[in-house]
Image (spheres, rainbow, N blue to C red):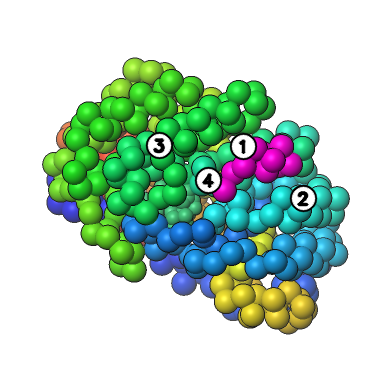
Amino acid sequence: MFEKRIKTHHSAMAEGKKYALGPRPVSQYLTSPEQDRGNGTIYIHVPFCPKICSFCNMRRSLQDAEPDYHRYVVKEIENYAKLPYIQSQTFDAVYFGGGTPTMLSDEAFREILQALFSNLSFTEDAEVTVETTVTELTEEKITVLGENHVNRFSVGVQTFNDEERIRMNRVGSGEKAYQKLKYLKDQGKFTLSMDLIYNYAGQTLDDLRRDLESIQELELDGFSMYSLIDMKGSRIDLSQDLRSDEMMFREIAETMEAAGYSFLELTKMVKGDQYRYIMNRHRAADTLPLGAGAGGSVNHLMMMNEINLDKYRESVEHFDTRKGMLFRPEYDEITRFKGDIQTLFLPGNETLYRDQQKYQRYRQQLMDEGYVKFCNDKYKLTDKGVFWGNTISRELSDMI
Ligand SMILES: C[S@@+](CC[C@H](N)C(=O)[O-])C[C@H]1O[C@@H](n2cnc3c(N)ncnc32)[C@H](O)[C@@H]1O
Ligand code: SF4
């Protein structure tokens, strides 16, 4: 049924243009209290990396964290905290992403986290995640973060295989990565997830099995699984073909299901990890974006922070001139449509399709060919459907 596997999450933006109402000044728009949007989330982008990995083209640059970066993030928090909408809002999850957020010093983290929790309101058990590489996450840093509300780590291990770590330009050995995860686990107070890359050139099923064994031994609460994408702008072109991709995916799904893990998202398996940040985003919750290069939407106002550090600083200093793009509330339905597929279901809102009969024929074909099954009143992706999930997402999106 499919020829080319799309591997990445396709943002809702492409379908969003027709819902845009035009630019609005942020500080003039968020002036009434939040009423019916429910708990929000916060995304904090830290665009620095210690070393550039050969496969990666994320929004980051090779440099030490700017010594004053966190001051601007703190100022940004204080600016937002003056707006009635943000003042009245309750946040349920925070995610520090990158780049490599743990490039920030311990003091910088402490200041940002204290600014967050003293200026904004959170649910009692708010999830606070820091994305990190193993090497940047020192024992002192783990202590500081643990004392300042952080309760979840997403560690970018990629593989424990040393040869491959060198080719990927990863810092440190697989054994070091393993020991650091074990140390984190032994603290007993963090939800622990790691990123795994598979289907890179030269990888055998045995190599993959060893990585999966390590995840089980460490009793991680979850892991993200990324089939290597040959990115424009990354420095290696290293993935294997579709047959091997499918075989490796099946190996991961079957082995880890047998070990008690299940799919939470197309690229995430969990055993206990709720990953509330992403689940809220899939439900179109407000996401307050902080830091250079961060993006998010609050009360239908889409905001994309400048990635250029000078421009970002300028926009914090002159916060009153900041603008976002206002979207019609119906746009949430598009976000949820995409979110449903990312969380393994065919979208519940079937009224969005332009041609109902065409959609029903497509859905029937998905069922006939084993990509989808009907259970508990919902159309759920099978493991085969999960493998093709982003391709299905694209084809369904083309029908709305
Ligand atoms: C934003 S990156 C940051 C993670 C963190 N800086 C690190 O390197 O450990 C998040 C994840 O995206 C995945 N990723 C990055 N480039 C990729 C690629 N070309 N193909 C597949 N996955 C990729 C990696 O697993 C990475 O850990
Ligand atoms: S994988 Fe992580 S550390 Fe490596 S370049 Fe990308 S963001 Fe930076």
Q: Is mark 3 within 8 Å of ligand 1?
A: no
Question: Label 3, label 1: how many angstroms apart (C-alpha)?
Answer: 21 Å
Q: Within the displayed image, which quadrant is ligand 2 positioned in?
A: bottom left
**Marks 4 and 3: CB-CB under 8 Å?**
no
Front-lying residue, 110 or 226: 110
Q: Where, by quadrant of the figure, is residue 263 drawn?
A: top left
Element type where label 1 sits in the image: strand
As drawn, 20 above or below 228: below
Q: Where, by quadrant of the figure, is residue 47 drawn?
A: bottom right
User: Split into 4 quadrants, where in the image is the C terminus?
Assistant: bottom left
Question: Label 3, label 2: how many angstroms apart (C-alpha)?
Answer: 29 Å
Mark 4 lies on residue: 135
- Write the residue at 27% across / 33% down: 208
Visible residue check, residue 16 = yes
Q: Which residues are magenta?
A: 136-145
Nearest-to-viewer mark from 3 and 2: 3
Circle 4: residue type = Thr
**Label disc, if present, on residue 174 of the rendered structure:** 3
